[in-house]
Image (cartoon, grey):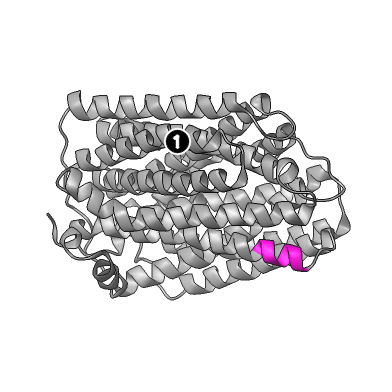
Amino acid sequence: MCEADAMPVVRDLRVLLQLRDFRRLLAVRLLSQSADGVYQVALAAHVVFSPEKETSAAAIASAMAVLLLPYSLLGPFAGVLLDRWRRRQVLLHGNALRCGLAAGTAVLILAQVPDWIFYVSALSVTGVNRFVLAGLSASLPRVVDTQERLVMANSLSPTAGTLAATVGGALALVLRIAVPDGSSSDAVVVLTGSALYLGAATAALRMPPGLLGPEPSALQPHLRAAVLSTVRGLTAGLRHLWERRAPTVALAAMTSMRFCYGALTVMVLMLCRYAWARTESEGLALLGLAVAVSGAGFFAAAVVTPGAVARLSPATHPDGRLRWIVVCTAAATVLVPGLGLFFEPAPMLAAAFVLGLVTQGAKIATDTVVQSSIADDFRGRIFSLYDVLFNVAFVAGAAVAALALPPDGRSAVLVILVAALYAATAVVVLFHVKHGPRETARSDVSRET
């Protein structure tokens, strides 16, 4: 067992937090993703819980598609550019730009403009998000000092970011309920997100411009040259990924799980809006509770995943991480229908915890497999592809939910379909573990700290 896995979890976290550059990158992530949580809940509240709107599952799915799908086309281009631009500059300018765009969204909400103008503004904020999130993930190996600590870094950093988004979402819900004046409360929440984006940009200034890579030899200073090389870069990136079956299988599994998460998210939104609450405020409060319970599952995943991976296989071998994905999907196969088919708040909240744990646990494993198996010069474009798969799968799951859900959100067919997909994912990954080619993790993690 490696050193990081042999120590207790708390001690491992303390060791990571002693790395100065890791702390600085983590600060940017926490502020940025807490702003994401605030902004996304503000949008959800405006679209789903506004008293003047009669929301349907189809309307929720359409909003998700408008906000996410157009930038799925941008994602691969973002990856190629991330492999040429200094990632610290992407984090600085991306968050500063989102600060201004989010403030503009607040003005549009107050002006009660037509929905399409509101969606264009929201689309701009989420579009920049493609660069920032991919840049954070691609930068992480540059701020840890050993390969052995990368699993723990992946447990702490993305999970802490998800928890920050959860806290941001909870803050948004509190503000929305405390200022129950429709558009005014939505604008206050969005402006809070704008302030947090500004904080993330300021935190990025604490890191040297060249710290997060890529290496100067990989930089293309002229945008036109970078854009012209996009197709060639994408082809090389996809070929690089395909030659490494472990990250390919992990990404496919995570895409499947994201589809399930999108479908169940729409179902919970509809249940909170119509089945479990008499007023919009009650529905928001229930949604906030579901988000908090799911966040507890994310935290549990951060605690248990490194030890689970170590027990399933040596941490330097990708099979251990893939086996953990099998465990996560198998658990979801059993527990999601076992809890979700009651369609009552208490068992559904338990299901939210399970989904938080298994989804984040699988994501930690997937992040580590990709970072360990993909060369630094390709990480930006592969993580952007990862981000695109996340968006497309989530929206596809939401679209299926829109077709399957009745007005009150109760659909046994949808729950069973999701459980079957979890089971199929577990079988496919297990087949690769048993019969696929044996691969070892890379050990060329940067030692710059």
Give the x, y percent position of residue 245: 26, 31
Residue at point 43% right, 54% down? 298
Give the x, y percent position of residue 376: 29, 50
The C terminus is located in which quarter? bottom left
Left or right: 155, with 353 as reference point: left
Give the x, y percent position of residue 8: 22, 65
Residue at point 55% right, 48% down? 349
Residue at the left extreme, as displayed: 1
Q: Nearer the viewer, residue 349 or 148?
A: 349
Res 85 seen here = no
Q: Quadrant of residue 143?
A: bottom left
Q: Count of labels shown?
A: 1
Q: Quadrant of residue 281?
A: bottom right
Residue at point 61% right, 33% down? 398
Q: Residues within 10 Å of mark 1 (few under 14, many from 20)?
A: many
Residue at point 34% right, 68% down? 22
- Identity, as a three-letter code, of the amino acid under mark 1: Met
Left or right: 147, with 377 as reference point: left
Left or right: 413, with 382 as reference point: right
Q: Nearer the viewer, residue 206 or 110?
A: 110
Magenta includes 261?
A: no
Magenta stretch, residue numbers: 172-178
Q: Nearer the viewer, residue 354 or 227?
A: 354
Q: Quadrant of residue 156?
A: bottom left
Res 395 seen here = yes
Left or right: 248, with 336 as reference point: left
Residue hosting label 1: 257
Give the x, y percent position of residue 218: 33, 51
The N terminus is located in which quarter? bottom left
By secondary structure, the bulk of the magenta-drawn segment is best described as helix
Q: What element does badge 1 sit on?
A: helix
Q: Nearer the viewer, residue 360 or 248?
A: 360
